[in-house]
Amino acid sequence: MNLDAIAHNTALFTERARTAVMAVVKADGFGHGMIPVARAALDNGADWLGVTSCAEALRLREAGITAPVLSWLHAHDTDFRRVIAATVDLSAASCHHLARIAAGAAEAGMTAMVHLKVDTGLCRNGESPARWPALVALARRLEQKGLIWVRGVWSHLVNAGVPGHLRTARQVELFDQAVALARAGGLDPQVRHLANSAAGLGLPGCRYDLVRAGIGLYGVEPVHGRTFGLRAAMTLHGRVILVKRVPAGTGVSYDHRYVTTVDSTLALVPIGYADGVPRTVGGRAEVWCGGRRHPVAGSVAMDQFVVDLGTGSTRLGDEVVVFGPGSRGEPTVTEWAGWADTIPHEVFTRLGDRIPRRYVGECRTRGVQPDREGR
């Protein structure tokens, strides 16, 4: 993990957005390591941190991080007392969730900081426009009791990565209406946020008071057909642990779905689908070994995969790069996502605890060890 890349990407978001930036570090920092990424981002211009769960928010606080944190996905029966006491902002997507937050605030003897979420078209989390007035009215009553403070109003875009999409314009319109209704109902939200990575970089009209930098923070360009100079933070690599020569016509791995076409050198790499490498990419995916690309031969197994070097050669212990920045010609995570018929987010977050995380770069932050096994 190159923390200098995280630093660069954070600074790029800050410069381009010209507003506050939230570094989204949910799912263990998209598999990169939540605490190291959070510290690197905060040290380089991020103002907020975003997580999915109360447990993730408390991990940040337990690590000594005091910056504003928003947690936004909660079960209907979540006990909010600890997270309110830890001064974590909470998203409320319905009257039920807001009432639970208020109950937790009453029990904690504190005022909960809340961001009301409106559904502007994603049809996922968030209150519908039809029921938004009821949520605003309840929030105002709870504010008057001193149980909550509505610090923010927010929503989530459907496809900001597609420039000029009409759906985005409609979402902006609905979001503005929701904010206006909140203010008309007596609320005074200071932080309006709608923009994800794609909108933060490519759609000035969506930036409002805060931009949420997610996949872009980790170096994946989020807007189709455009590049902004983001730098990939993760390189996934393994080592060759076995080498063998086989004749042309040799079947490789389960079911022999891959057959060598020439006398070949095969290299075994001890990373498999139990570590997060997609099982189905065999025959499509490529890796970097010995200064060039070579195909993954056959199905990826639970703990290992085979590389067909053809007429090339390798030695025990040689590095095999699964994906990286692409600057040497190695595959990128975006290419791997294409081979697996998914998105880079899933490739990153599949990577499990058996893969050691090593942090490099001059930006390596306080308390981050240069080598980390698992989480």
Image (cartoon, rainbow, N blue to C red):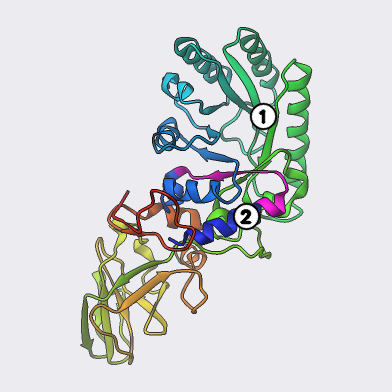
- Note whether 102 is above or below 347 in the view shown: above
Give the Cα separation between the discs numbered 1 and 2: 25 Å
Instruction: Check the image and name the residue furthest to the top.
Output: 145
SS at badge 1 = strand
Q: Is residue 192 visible?
A: yes
Q: Amino acid at mark 1?
A: Val
Residue 39, how many percent across, how many down?
48, 47
Judged left or right of residue 127, residue 333 is: left
Total labels: the figure holds 2
Q: Which residues are magenta?
A: 14-26
- Find out whether residue 23 is within the magenta segment: yes
- Note whether 118 is above or below 261 in the view shown: above
SS at badge 2 = helix
Q: Report if the CB atoms under discs 1 and 2 are less than 8 Å apart.
A: no
Judged left or right of residue 299, residue 142 is: right
> Pointer 1: what residue?
153
> Pointer 2: what residue?
11
Residue 17, how many percent across, how many down?
71, 49
Judged left or right of residue 302, residue 286 is: right
Residue 154, how many percent across, how many down?
65, 33
Q: Residue at position x 56%, y 45% from top?
A: 23
Q: Is residue 76 visible?
A: no
Q: Residue at position x 64%, y 22% from top?
A: 150
Residue 32, how many percent across, how many down?
43, 54
Task: Report the front residue among 308 and 86.
Answer: 86
- Note whether 314 is above or below 254 in the view shown: below
- Find out whether residue 308 is within the magenta segment: no
